[in-house]
Image (cartoon, grey):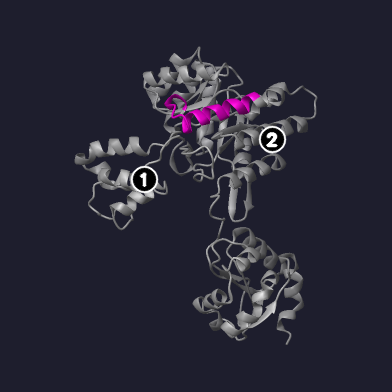
Amino acid sequence: MVKLPGPLDIYPLLPGTNCEECGEANCMAFATKLAEYTVKLAACAPLYKEAQYVKKLTKLEDLIRPPVREVVIGTGEKAASIGGKLVLYRHDLRYSNPIAFFVDVADTLEGDALSQRVKAIEDWTYMYIGQNLRLDGVALRGVSQDPQTFAKAAKKLSELTDWPIILCSLNSEMLAAAANAIADKRPLLYAATLDTWSDVGDIAVKHNLPLVAYAPSGLDDIATLVNTLRAMGVEEIVLDPGTASRAGLGTTVDSFTQLRRAATLEENELVGYPLLATPISVWADHKEGAAPELTKWDEVLTAAAMIVRYSDAIVVHSLDMWTNLPLTFLRSNLYTDPVKPVAVEAGLQEFGKVDADSPVMYTTNFALTYFTVESDIKQAGVNAYLVVVDTEGMSVQSAVAGRRLTAEKVAESLEEYKVSDKVKHKVLISPGMAARISGETEEVSGWTVKVGPQDSSGIPKYLQSGKWKEE
C-alpha cells in the first residue's frame, strides 16, 4: 500500500523562510496542509521563483505525487481536473477531483443543432443541498469519419463553449486535424490504441495534450501501451480498458477495480492514471425503432456502476433529468468527506422583508437540515429570521443527543448575532426535535421558547397560523 508523506517528510524540502506567501503562518503549517492534501504545492511561491530551490521542488513533486496522477482537460476556470487519487477507499481519506461528466455531440450536427445541444449541456443544472449539480464537458464524436468535417465541428464547438472538450475518434488523421484546430483549448484526445499509438502519441507530444490509452483487449496491453506512450514523451494519460453493458458489465467493473488497486495498493506506476468510462457505448446495441428509454436505463445503470468503481470521467449521451440527476446525486455523495458532514456556515439568515415583528427560528448547520428548513420557510411566504447554530454539521436530533446543540449554544448564538436588536419581541421558535432543551433554553437565554413542528414540512402552516405569537 502506498505510504502517504507526513509533515516531517515534507518540511525539510520547503524553503524554511516562513514567508507566509502561501497564506499559512509558517512552513511547518504549510507542510501539514500539504500532507493533508488540502493545499496545492504551487501556493509556495519561492519554490517556483527562486533557482536555489529547483532540486527541492523536484523532490517534493515526486514525494507528494498521488498514486493516481492528475490530468487536466481544458483551460481556465472551467478546466476539468481528473484523477489525483490517493487511496482506494474513501474512508481512508476523502476523494478529491469529482468525476467529470461529459456529454456527446456528433460532428454531423447541422445548422443550429450543434449550438442547441451545447447550450442544453451547459444549462443542465439542479440545486441540491446548496450545491449546484451540473455537467462538466463536451465529447465531440467523429461520426462523419471525415477529418475536415471533424476539425470544422471542433472549431465551432470551441467557439461555442469554454467547457473542456474530448475529441473522440479512433482515426488518427481526424484527431490530428481537430487538434490542429483547437490545440489552445487543450482537449483530451480519444484515443491511442495498440494500432495508432505512434501517430496519436506524436499529436499529443506536438501540442502538449492529454490522451486516452484505449486497450479493451486486456490490462497487460494497457500497461504496455502506457509504457510506450511515456517513452515517447506523453506526460498526461487517461486509461480506458473498455466499457461494456449487461453481460459484460461485471468484467468492466473488475477491470477498473484491478487498475485502481494496482495503482493505489501495489504502486504500479504504469497504471497510476485516471480512468475513463464510456457508458455511452450501450447505444451501440440500440436497435432502430426500439424504445430509447430502455437504452437510457442501461446507460444509467452502467454509469452508476462505473462511478462507484473508480471512474474519474464518464461519457454519456442522454441529457434527460431523470437519467443524469441520480448520477450527479451519486457523485455528490461519493465525493463528500465521510468524516465531516456537509455543513453550511452558522449565522443569522433573513427571509423576505423582515422587521421588528418577524418570527425568529433556529436550526442546526447540517446542510440537509438547513436547506430543507429554508425551503419550507420560503414556501410559507412569511418574513422570518433563522438562527443557524454551529453543531459541527449534525442534524437537530443527533446534535441534541450528542450535546452539540445545547441551551448554552442557542443562547450564545442569539447573543453573537444580536438578534434581540432586530426584533421587539423575545420569542424563539425551536425545532420540534429539540423540544427537550426548550425549558433550559428559556432559562439560559431569557427568551420565551415556542416548540415548532416535529417535521419541517409543518413550518409553513405553523408560521402562517401565527401560533408562535400566542401566550
Question: Disc 2 designates what residue?
Answer: 300
Residue name at image x 37 percent, y 39 percent: 64
Residue 241 in view in this figure: yes
Determine if the magenta segment contains residue 379: no
Q: What residue type is labelled 2?
A: Val
Q: Distance between the residues labelled 2 and 1?
A: 40 Å
Residue name at image x 53 percent, y 55 percent: 340
Residue 357 in view in this figure: no
Determine if the magenta segment contains residue 255: yes
Q: What stretch is highlighted in magenta?
A: 251-271
Relative to 148, residue 329 above or below:
below
Question: Disc 1 designates what residue?
Answer: 6
Q: Which amino acid does label 1 sit on?
A: Gly
The image quarter containing residue 3 is: top left
* Farthest residue, direction top: 195
Badge 2 crowding class, 10 Å Cα cut-off, few under 14, some 14 to 19, many 20 or more, is: many
Image quarter where the C terminus lies is bottom right
Q: Which of 398 and 135 is in front in this view?
A: 398
The image quarter containing residue 366 is: bottom right
Badge 1 crowding class, 10 Å Cα cut-off, few under 14, some 14 to 19, many 20 or more, is: some
Q: Where is residue 384 in the image (x, y as percent from the top left)?
A: 64, 74
Image quarter where the N terminus lies is top left
Q: Where is residue 184 in the image (x, y as percent from the top left)?
A: 42, 32
Helix, strand, or loop for circle 1?
loop
Q: In this view, does 43 lie to the left or right of 391?
A: left
Task: Assess whether mark 1 and mark 2 are in contact (beta carbons under 8 angstroms).
Answer: no
Q: Which of marks 2 and 1 is nearer the N terminus?
A: 1
Q: Where is residue 81 in the image (x, y as percent from the top left)?
A: 47, 38
Q: Nearer the viewer, residue 159 or 352?
A: 352
Q: What secondary structure is the stretch in magenta mostly built from?
A: helix
